[in-house]
Image (cartoon, grey):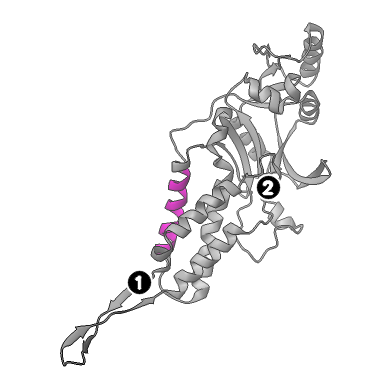
């Protein structure tokens, strides 16, 4: 990712009052599995880009060489003419790398990558309407670094398995392609000519590096959201472990055990992170939130749970 992009001290999660109640009373925040998010193109967007990089560089990746042969031939009159034929050669290891990586990027399969969505913008009408109960909800402003630190401190000192990081979402397709290329091409070119199994193993390593990047890239049409994501994923790359089966070793690399809730008749997997009260910096109420009495109830609720963040009201005009 672009290292020049920093995470603001305060980012905002737009949600309903019901969701706010669950977050504050439990002190926990859900990171949803990326394959079950509202945008059906989540993950698939970046996988499509990776597949296009593979297709465009097929000969380069597979080490395919094309040779044209022009052996002399004698015509019926005794003269010499030329004819041509062509042949090609290919590295088996590199071909298997290409094939296996294409398969991994093409199949629709469950994976343990989870994220929570935040915005740099505290008072955005489109997000009030889309994510905060049509303007009746709130935007919870938090400091993500404090959340990351609190969750690392809660684990055993010797436990280094937790992967929890905050990343700005990148919306420029040219940059998406650059990151995919910088992983796929060097890993293909560093693979020595050899047996098929070596190419398959290298493809697994390449996919392991590509998969955590998928939540960081989105279709340019979502640019206005200016999204920041809190992402957690496991660090295993083996395709021999069935990700959709309950595996305590694999799940031990996540911030919590995998849990589920029902949404529109479907089970949605999620994990949870702890949100310490001091990580909450602001609470914005939406343009349709209610009146001063409702704000008073909100203030009482927050202070009961040791949250002293100021309450701010949206300036958006919306009914």
Per the picture, the main secondary structure of the magenta-coloured stretch is helix
Q: Earlier in the sequence, mark 1 or mark 2?
A: 2
Residue drawn at 44 percent across, 76 percent down: 194
Q: Secondary structure at mark 1?
A: strand
Splitting the image into 4 quarters, where does residue 128 fall? top right
Q: Which residues are magenta?
A: 176-189
Asked which quadrant contains residue 157, the reply is: top right
Quadrant assignment for the C terminus:
top right
- In depth, the one of 83 and 54 nearer the eye is 83
Examine the image and state in which quarter residue 21 appears. top right
Q: On residue 65, which mark appears?
A: 1
Please report the residue visible at 55 percent of the width from the left and 51 percent of the height from the top: 48
Tell me, for residue 35, which label it has, or none.
2
The residue mark sitting in front, 1 or 2, is: 1
Tell me, yes or no, whether the highlighted magenta stretch contains residue 181.
yes
3D distance between C-alphas at marks 1 and 2:
39 Å
Where is residue 317 drawn, in percent x and y?
67, 11
- Residue furthest left in the image: 79
Depth check: give the residue in front, 188 or 63. Answer: 63
């Amino acid at each position: 990712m672009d290292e020049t992009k920093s995470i603001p001290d305060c980012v905002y999660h737009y949600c309903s009052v019901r969701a706010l109640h669950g977050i504050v009373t439990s002190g926990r925040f859900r990171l949803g599995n990326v394959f079950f998010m509202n945008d059906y193109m989540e993950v698939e967007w970046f996988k499509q880009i990776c597949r296009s990089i593979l297709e465009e560089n097929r000969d380069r990746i597979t080490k395919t060489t094309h040779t044209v042969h022009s052996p002399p031939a004698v015509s019926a009159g005794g003269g010499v003419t030329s004819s041509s034929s062509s042949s090609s050669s290919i590295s088996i290891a590199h071909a298997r790398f290409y094939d296996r990586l294409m398969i991994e990027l093409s199949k629709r399969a469950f994976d343990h990558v989870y994220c929570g969505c935040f915005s740099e913008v505290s008072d955005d009408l489109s997000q009030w309407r889309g994510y905060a109960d049509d303007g009746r909800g709130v935007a919870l402003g938090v400091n993500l670094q404090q959340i990351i630190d609190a969750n690392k401190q809660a684990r055993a000192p010797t436990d280094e398995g937790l992967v929890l990081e905050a990343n700005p979402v990148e919306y420029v397709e040219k940059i998406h392609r650059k990151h995919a290329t910088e992983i796929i091409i060097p890993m293909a070119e560093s693979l020595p000519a050899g047996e098929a199994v070596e190419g398959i193993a290298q493809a697994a390593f390449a996919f392991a590096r590509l998969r955590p990047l998928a939540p960081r890239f989105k279709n340019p049409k979502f640019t206005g959201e200016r999204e920041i994501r809190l992402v957690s994923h496991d660090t295993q790359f083996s395709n021999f472990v069935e990700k959709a089966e309950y595996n305590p070793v694999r799940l031990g690399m996540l911030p919590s055990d995998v849990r589920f809730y029902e949404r529109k008749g479907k089970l949605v997997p999620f994990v949870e992170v702890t949100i310490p009260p001091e990580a909450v910096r602001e609470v914005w109420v939406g343009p349709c939130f209610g009146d001063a009495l409702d704000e008073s109830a909100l203030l009482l609720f927050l202070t009961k749970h040791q949250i002293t963040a100021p309450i701010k009201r949206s300036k958006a005009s919306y009914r």
